[in-house]
Image (cartoon, grey):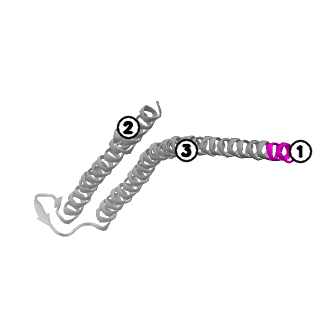
Amino acid sequence: MQKKRIQKITTELFSLINNKEAKKEIQKISKNLNKIKKNLEKDFQKKSNKVKKLFKETHKVNIGPIQTSFIPSKVYKKITKEAEQVYVNGNAEINKILKLSKKETQNKINQAMVIQDLVDAKIKKLMDKLSKTTKKKASAKKKATKKKSSTKKKTTKKKASTKKKASKKKTSTKKKSSAKKKK
C-alpha cells in the first residue's frame, strides 16, 4: 500500500517536472517576441520608405516641362511638413506597438510564471507527502523493532523472576527439613 502511494507521488512529480503546458507557454512567448520583432521591422521599413519617397519628391519637383532641383519655399515647407508628420506618426505608431507588445509579452510571461508557481507548489506538496510517507514507514519499522525488543525483555524478566522464586522455595524447604532434623 505504502509503496504504491510513493510510486504514485513520484510519477506525479515526474509529470510535473516535465510540464508540457508551461513549456508550451514559454515557447509561445519566444515565438511571439520574434513575430513582434519582425512586424516592427516591417512597419519601420514601410514608414521609412514613405519618408524616403517624400524626400525624393521634395528634391525632384516638376515645374512645367523642365525638371529642376529648385523648389519654391511654399512647396518645400508643405512637403517637409508632410514628411515630418509621417515620421512623427510612424514613431508614435512604433511606440504604440512596442508598448502593446511589451504588455502582451508581460502577460504571457506572467501566465507562464503562474503555471510554474502552481507546478512548484504541487511539487512541494507532493514532496512533503512523500517525505511524510517515508517517515511513517521508518517510524513504523522502529516501533516494530521496539515492540519486539520490549517483549523479549519482558520474557527474560519473567524467566528470571520464576528462577528466583524457585530458588527461594528450595532454600525454605531446606531450612524446614534441617529444623525438623534438629528436633
Judged left or right of residue 27, residue 131 is right
Based on the displayed image, in which of its 4 quarters is residue 154 positioned?
top right
**Cβ–Cβ below 8 Å for labels 3 and 1?**
no
Q: Is 88 positioned to the left or the right of 144 in the image? A: left
Q: Secondary structure at mark 2?
A: helix
Numbered disc 3: secondary structure? helix
Which residue of the protein is positioned furthest toward the right in this rendering? 183
Q: Earlier in the sequence, mark 3 or mark 2?
A: 2
Q: Earlier in the sequence, mark 3 or mark 1?
A: 3
What main secondary structure does the magenta stretch of the protein show? helix
- Disc 1 marks a residue whose amino acid type is Lys
Q: Is residue 29 magenta?
A: no
Which is more N-terminal, label 2 or label 1?
2
Q: Which is in the foreground here, disc 3 or disc 2? A: 3
CB of mark 3 within 8 Å of CB of mark 2?
no
Q: Position of residue 49 (x, y in %)?
A: 22, 56
Determine crowd level at label 2: few under 14, some 14-19, many 20+ residues with C-alpha closer than 10 A.
few
Give the mark toward the camera: 1 or 2.
Answer: 1
The alpha-carbon separation of the residues under discs 3 and 1 comes to 58 Å
Which quadrant would residue 173 be assigned to in this image?
top right
**Which residue corresponds to the image point at 71% horizontal and 42% vertical from the top-left?**
166
Residue 152: give x, y in percent of width and height.
59, 43
* 36 to the left or right of 134: left
Residue 181 rendering spot, x and y as whole percentages: 82, 45
Q: CA distance from mark 3 to mark 2?
A: 31 Å
**The disc labelled 3 sits on which kind of residue?**
Thr
Q: Which residue is mark 3?
A: 145
Q: Magenta region: which residues? A: 175-183
Q: Which mark is residue 183?
A: 1
Q: Which residue lies under the disc numbered 2?
A: 11
Residue found at the very far top of the displayed protein: 1
Q: Which circle, 3 or 1, is nearer the viewer?
A: 1
